[in-house]
Amino acid sequence: MVPSFDLLTQPWIPVVGPDGRVDAMGLEDVVAKAHTIRRIAGEAPTMTAALHRLLLAVFHRAYGPPNETVWRDLWEAESIPADPLRNYLEHRRDRFDLFHPKVPFMQCAELRSLTPATAAKLVPYRAVGNNVTLFDHTTSEDKVVLTPQEAARWLVTVQAFDPGGMKTPYEKDKSSERAPCNWFGVVLVEGQNLKETLLLNALVYLPDYEKPEMTTADDRPVWEEPTGPSPRPDKRTARGWTDLLTWPSRRVLLFTRETGGSSVVDAAVITPGTRLDVKLPDEEKMAAFRTPRDAKGKFKKDAPLLPVRLYPLRGVWRHSVELLLSDPWEEHQYRQRPAALDQMAELAESGYIPADAVYTLRLFGQHLDSKATVVETWLEEEVPAPVPLIRARDEQLSGIIGHAIALADDVGSALRSFQSEYHREFKADQPVADISRGYWPRLARPFGAFLIDLGKARTAGRSEAPTARAWGWHVVELARAAVDRWVAGSPAESRAMLALGKHRAIFDDRVQTAERVFRARIPSYTDGPEEPDA
C-alpha cells in the first residue's frame, strides 16, 4: 500500500485553544477555525516560527490581501471565509501529501536513490552518531521513529532553521549554509486569536505590483513549483515574499514503514538545498534591523544594517527601539522594524485597528555553536506592542526608550564591576554565580509595563516623564536586590565582609549617578503637563 498523509485535512499543526487546551488540526481547519484558536505552539520556538511562516505563505496565496480594504473586510469578518482557500487548493491538493510518490510536500523524490539515515537527523535535540545534545539522553543505537504529524512539523522547521555544515551529498556537494531563519530573530505580531495574528502579519500582497517590496510577479511558494526540486543544490535570489517564507534550504526525503496498520517515518535523507542570495534588510519582512554603534555609542558610519537577534540572559526588549519605532531619518536609515508594524501604523491611521490597542511581539530564534553546525539553545521572548508607539513618527519616544535601556545597561555594568572588583581584591578562586542572572531576566516584565504606560501617556496627551521615572526606580531596586542576594551567598569571614562593604558603597554611588543622569535627560524628551509622582 502506498502511504499517504494529507496535510490539509489530517491533524498535525499544534494549536492552543482559549482554555489552554492543546490540540492538533489540519491546515484547512487551522485557517477556517483561526478565530477559535489562541495560538500555534510547536515543540520548540523554531517550530512555532516555521509553522507561522508556512501558514502566512498559504494565506497570502489564497487571500492576498490585495489592498487595505480587503484586509479590513477580513479583519471585521467573524471568521476567515473558506471559499478563497478552497479555490486556491482545488488543483494543488496533491502537493500537500507528505508521502506523495512524485512530489512529496517540501521534499525531493529523486533522493530515493540515496541510503537514508536515522530520522533523528530531523530533530535537533536527538543524538545522532557522536553528537551528544543538551536536550536528549538517547544514543545513536536507539531507533527514532516519528509519526507523520511529528515528521511534518520537523520537516517544515528544518527548511527554515537547519544548521549549516556537511550534509549527505547527492553527488559531490555536501556543504550547506545555515537555513535563512538562523540569521535573525523571527518577529511575529500576536493578536487575541490566530485570526488576528494571521491578519496582523499578512502584508498587502499584490505580486504584479511588487507588493510587498521586492516581490515579483513570479513569486510562488515551494509547493507551486511545476515539478519537484532538483536534487542538485543551487543558488538564487528570492522571487518574492512567499518564496522566501517557504525557502527550500534543504533537499529532504522521508522514508516510511508500516506498523500497526499505519505509516511511520523511521529514516530520512537531508542534502544541501538552495542557497539564498539575499540582502536581508531589503527582503526579509519578519525581522528588525539596527545600525551598530562604536565604543562611544555613536552609529558607525556607512555600516550595514544588522538583524536583531535573541541572546541568552539579556532580553530582546533591549532592542525595543528597533522593534517598535519607525525611523524618521531621510538621509540615512539607522533602524528598520518588521514590515507588519509599518502596515499596522497605516491601518490605525485609517481606523481599521484600534488606535489604543496593545498587541504582542513574539520573537523566536536559536543559537548555534561557533561552527554554526549544532543547535545549542532555543529562544523565545515577547515584547508589548502598543499601537500608540507604533504610530509615533517622532524621535521623542526613541529618546525616552533609548535612555531607559541605557540606564539598564549602565546599572548592569555597575553590577559586573561590583562582582569583578570584589573578587579581584578578595582573590576568590571558587566558582561563583554570575550576579547578572539575578538582574537581566527580571527586567523584562517591568520594561513591558513601561512600554504599555508610555503608550497610554501618548494617547492621553500626558507627559511620559512619570512613567520613565518609575522605570528608573524598578531598575535600581532590581539591581540592589541582585546584590543583596549575591552578598547573602558570599563568605561571611571578616575580611570578605570588609571587601563587600567597600565595593557595595562604590556600586551604590555608580547606580545613584546613573539614575541622576537618566532623570536629568528625560525632561528634554517629554512634553505635555508634568504630573507629580504618585
Image (spheres, rainbow, N blue to C red):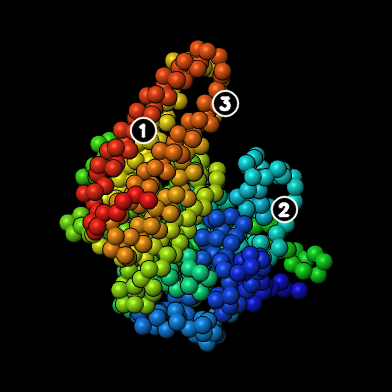
Q: Amino acid at mark 1?
A: Val
How far apart are the alpha carbons under marks 2 and 3?
44 Å
Q: Is residue 162 above or below residue 259?
A: above
- Tell me if mark 2 has few (under 14), some (14-19) or many (20+) residues whose alpha carbon lies within 10 angstroms of its own: some
Q: At 18% across and 59% down in the image, what residue appears?
A: 330
Say left or right for 328 vs 206: left
**SS at circle 3:** loop
Q: Amino acid at mark 3?
A: Gly
- Which of the 4 image quarters holds residue 138? top right
Residue 342 coordinates in the image, percent (x, y): 33, 66
Question: Which residue is disc 1 drawn over?
Answer: 511
- Viewer-nearest of discs 2 and 3: 3
Q: Which is nearer the eye, 242 or 329?
A: 329
Q: Amino acid at mark 2?
A: Val
| Res 37 seen here | yes
Say left or right for 403 vs 482: left
Question: Which residue is disc 3 drawn over?
Answer: 489
Question: Which residue is disc 2 drawn over?
Answer: 144
Report the residue that reaches farthest toward the top.
495
